[in-house]
Image: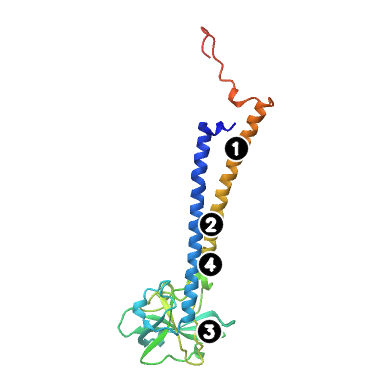
Amino acid sequence: MHRFLLTPRWWGINVFAVLAVPFCLVLGVWQLGRFEDRVDNHRAQEQRAAESGRERPAELATLLPPTTETVGRTATVTGTYDAREQLLVPDRVLDGERGFYVLTPLLPRDGGAAVPVVRGWLPGDPDPAAVPAPPAGPVTVTGALQAAESPRAVNARSGLPTGQVAVIGAASLINLLPYEVINGFVTEREAAGPLRPVPPQAAGGTGLDLKAFQNLGYTAEWFVFAAFVVFMWFRLYRRELEVRRDAELGILPDPRDAPGPPVPARGSPAP
């Protein structure tokens, strides 16, 4: 009854199923591992952000460029604020209230790329008159290192007036500042009144974002594919059994007894 499983046709079906099921399961487990890694990275970033301020500060130069391992770390850098190039970042929410960031470039004492520093947050619409002037002369800034922002992540607006920027990052600041800046920024730990300090945030792209749920969706898809292969194998198997049982009962002709092409009689012309 089951000897048909050894026919060439079923050998092909069996080999395909044996190879396809493990292949789908391995890819599903791999996608699940990627999802778990992103969640673990996000938790580590959140913990690092929560502990920011209690850890010993590190020189900013040793934490650059910003990575998932260094974002949120407490950094320190000495330099001079460039008040002439100060920018305001609108549409920023702090504790449920809408306001704006005050972003002032810091020119490091040892030279190199300037450091965008978020000196603090103020409520309401951007107003340069409400912003206190930065300290004059050399200062040492201590704060959390942050990665450059993504325009999609912050829902950036276009067409802002002079003196404002929607996204904090080298790509957006290069057209507004007369010098090179690092591809990230520092949120100052202690803001001078009336500024309020901006708490550090976990790095983007490391947690339960769209990409993470894409990994989770791909995991489900590969497991569904594996189940579909098994389902189709059993469906073909049951159909083959039913056909052969019907043939044994005389309900259907036995597929093994199907007539071949007619053999011409000896001496007759070939068709």
Identity, as a three-letter code, of the amino acid under mark 2: Thr
Q: Say which residue appears at 55% left-offset and 49% top-offset.
A: 226
Identity, as a three-letter code, of the amino acid under mark 1: Tyr
Give the mark nearest the N terminus, 4 or 2.
Answer: 4
Task: Tell me: residue 64, above or below residue 251.
Answer: below
Give the mark nearest the N terminus, 3 or 4.
Answer: 3
Q: Can residue 269 be seen in this view?
A: yes
What is the C-alpha distance between the residues marked 1 and 2?
Answer: 28 Å
What is the C-alpha distance between the residues marked 3 and 4?
Answer: 29 Å
Identity, as a three-letter code, of the amino acid under mark 4: Asp
Give coordinates of residue 157: x percent, y percent: 53, 73
Crowdedness near tag 1: few (<14), some (14–19) or many (≥20) residues, C-alpha within 10 Å: some
In front: label 4 or label 2: 2
Q: Mark 4 points at which residue?
A: 209
Side of 143 where 94 appears, left or right: right
Q: Nearer the viewer, residue 38 or 236?
A: 236
Label 2 residue SS: helix
